[in-house]
Image (cartoon, rainbow, N blue to C red):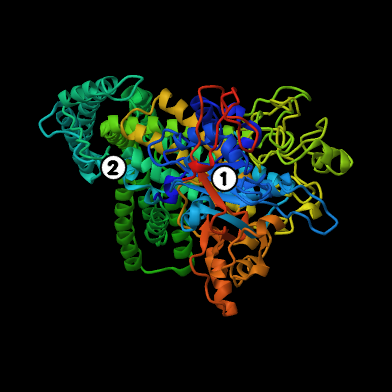
Amino acid sequence: MTTSEDTTAVVRLDLRAEAAALATPQAVRDRVAEQVGRAGLPEPDYPLFLVTDTPAGLTDHQLQYELLSGYRAVGETRIVVLLVGSSPGSYAGGEEAYLPDRRLVRPTTLRTSTTGLVWAGDLRSARTALDRPEPDDPAALAVLVDLLSVPDVFVRVLEGLRKLPDSVAAPGVRLLEQDLPTEVRDRAWRDALTRFAGEDTGAGNPVDVVPDAQLPEPLRALVTGRDGRGHGHRRPDGPANLAHRTCAESLDRADEDLVALRSFPGLLHPARRDALEADLHQAREDLGGFRALVERALQGGGGAAAPTAEATARLGALGLRVPTADSAGERVGEGLRELAGTLLGDGLALRSVAQHFTALAGRVEPVPGTALLHRLADHSEESVTRGSATEYAAPPRTPGTVLLMAGAAGLLGGLWQWPAVLAALLVPVLFVAVALLGANRLRTGRRAARWPMGPRVAAVVGAVAGAAVAYAAEPPLWLGGTGLLVGLGLTAEAVRRLWRDAADSWAAGRGTTALRTALVGLDALLAELVREHWAAEERLYCADAARSVAGMLRATAAAADAQAAPEPLAPAGSGGSGPYEDDDWLSAPSALETTESGAADGGADDGDWAAAYAWDDSADRYGDHEGDRNRDPYADPYGDRGSDPDGEPDGGGPGPDGTPSPAAYPAGPDDAPWGSGEGDRAPRWLDREIGEGGPDLVATLAGDLRNTAMAAMAPYWGAVERGQAGALALSRTEERVRELLSAARHHLWRYGVLAPPPYPADHRARTTAAGLLGTDSLRVAELVGREADRGSVVQLSSPEQGALLSRDPEAALWIRFAPGTLQGEIEAAWRKSGSPPAEEALWTSSGRYAGLIRLTPLRMGVVDTVLPRQSTGDAPRADTGRSDPSDPSGRTEFREDDRW
């Protein structure tokens, strides 16, 4: 016994019309490849064959059954034969005449533990007693075939048949179908594809960068690891550190000289200024040497390509320390996969995710040293000179406190009466003398330093104001003397501050600030160069892989756009290109029909069921199709009209017998899956509930597409981890994406929207039937939980066949089934209503059908197993009944004494 995970698509064969085409092992294998390949599946290890035949065909098609039973596969081959129609009778001996439905004769080939027979003598599709459908009504048969084609149902039915005598049963069914109209499903599919792909707004548009904290650990280490590598980039005994230390020491000495210059002795003696200028000159030369070393490091730190091991060695020769990568580059592929899963899981479109990966590549990619050379101009000698001139372009602004001190000093020094009022000129004269001395001391060439005018003006104004106050108040001499002493003290403090600011401004103009800034900038540039060399190869690989993933995501988006685009129509009358174009069993005459019955029923009026199921293409979104279309349940029963599930247009050319071969299957106005053109033509054992789509439909389908894309990209991540994410891996992944998108479309059309695609899904629960279809699952719960009585199902047996069924009610086997995605809703409805849960309910992978199947065994002696004998002539005959042993045609002979 195999699990459902081991099964593949059920291969459907109709030996009533295509037995001649399946006369060799290669023909059978080709037909299997066509069907499973169309579903996007590989060669099956455990083949499942659903064969439609007539009771007479069991012996007529012995060769085909032997080919199917002996199909070469890894595991066991399982076969369910769906027999439709009545048996032509069998010889019972004596004077008993040939009676219909008295015996079911089967060859010993079909008496195995892996084969079961389901005999539906009459599909009972008539809604009223006035209807006269054929016993093998194609519309009803298509539904039954679709149901048994669900692998879960197929396996459970076969298991049930094994428990019955002779592994033969007559079915009874009651089904409920929940689905969407074709136009609603098609529109939702295209909207989901558009949402999944995203808008193509240009790859250069800005995108919000994923925060470092949200990046997977392997990627976060590469993005943020270099940021902590800026310290200790110079070796203590290396040339780079020596050049940097020499320049820094020269600037430190210049700073010490500046401190001495800013004092009063610096104002009075020129020696301190000369010492400062000498140290600044030496600092310029030392900075030039360090700049040259930085330039060599940048030129040797990698060319147009990324940094290499050789470039790292050259940096080491210059005394730079490049930290080791350790294990920072491990699990890059795992990190990229996790990031893609996170972004897609958040609902981002493919093109948005591709932009995030492009941004990630830009963040993690190492910058070669030559790309940093242009930044040396910011720290060149000309830049230092230009920055110094900018600092010295204007004199320092005089603080307000200095102005107040100058004014107060002038006021206090002017409190004298005549003739002592001349002493009021002392403070202004001091300010003027200091200004002349300071400007001359800081002279540059022929140009004296600019000195602020404000303090001098404030001192003069204060002296005038003091004299005016003394003239009016006539203060005593001691008050004037005291005021003059205090004014001189304020003058000394104001002059000290003025000289300090002037010396600082002059020193900045000579380069103290610009030289220090250039040294810091050059060292930062050197540290950045070292950081870019950290884990350079790992980061380069990560960047290339991220860009490759971005390209793959954009290719996937393009494939989704192609799936969403309207498909071209095949010209009317052109040959079909789909793998099932020759599968035209519905347009071939039924094995149960006769010429007389067709004429008696009025020809095309009543007997031509295809005319009743013709599709009106006048309002079809794909355009007009000439002629009527018949539905073939052995091709894709839910494929969209006019194309294969893979998006390739099908033709409408003739089938193998000259009748029109359906390019796809029409659906009625309410999208009957069996191709009914009218809602009341559904079999009476089938109820249909058609929704208009729920609010979560498009979002759920888009989520399914994201899961499909991640499944398609699974092999690609392995190539990324192995370092083989090249063009070949990308092209293979793109092809797999297209195949799985086509398979997802095939799955949607075949199994409906309730069933998730057969790919790894996320951990979120799938939404309800109301959210997807706009329907309620209560009817499903009521049907599946219904008591097992004969009135709840319709027995698919003719009155003649009914006499052959077992009368023991306990002998029948019941199969209750519903879509697995509705299990939670159905069980909740059972608990709410107080109904006991159905035992051994089958939760299927299909989301379209739910209901009951009753397998009723036949009475003892009805099934007759015979050992066929075949002479050396032609293939087994195609007629039914006993053969004449004297017939020289070499037909198969079935002897009464050869019963098993």
The picture places residue 438, in percent across and down from the top left corner, at: 32, 39
Q: CA distance from mark 2 to mark 1?
A: 78 Å
Position of residue 247 relative to residue 810, above or below, is above
Crowdedness near tag 2: few (<14), some (14–19) or many (≥20) residues, C-alpha within 10 Å: some
User: Label 2 sits on what residue type?
Assistant: Gly
Q: Would residue 329 be visible to someone looking at this image?
A: yes
Residue at the image point whose x is 68% and y is 69% from the top = 791
Residue 372: percent from left, percent from top: 35, 26
Foreground residue among 100 and 382: 100
Give the x, y percent position of residue 847: 59, 54
Q: Which callout, 2 or 1, points to the residue nearer the camera? A: 1
As drawn, the residue found furthest toward the bottom would be 834
Q: Is residue 282 left or right of residue 72?
A: left
| Residue farthest front in this picture | 94
Indicate the position of residue 435 as horizontal and vertical percent values: 36, 41
Is residue 551 among what the camera can see? Answer: no
Report the front residue among 411 and 737: 737
**Front-lying residue, 325 or 774:** 774
Q: Which residue is mark 1?
A: 105
Q: Which residue is mark 2?
A: 225
Taking 560 as reference, is 497 left or right? left
Residue 248, located in which quarter of the rendered image? Answer: top left
**Quarter where residue 795 is shown:** bottom right
**Amino acid on which the number 1 mark rests in the picture:** Val
Name the element at disc 1. Answer: strand
Horizontal side of 847 relative to 775 (left or right) equals left
Q: Considering only order in the chain, which callout, 1 or 2, is on the residue closer to the N terminus?
A: 1
Whether residues under marks 2 and 1 lie with C-beta atoms below 8 angstroms apart, the answer is no
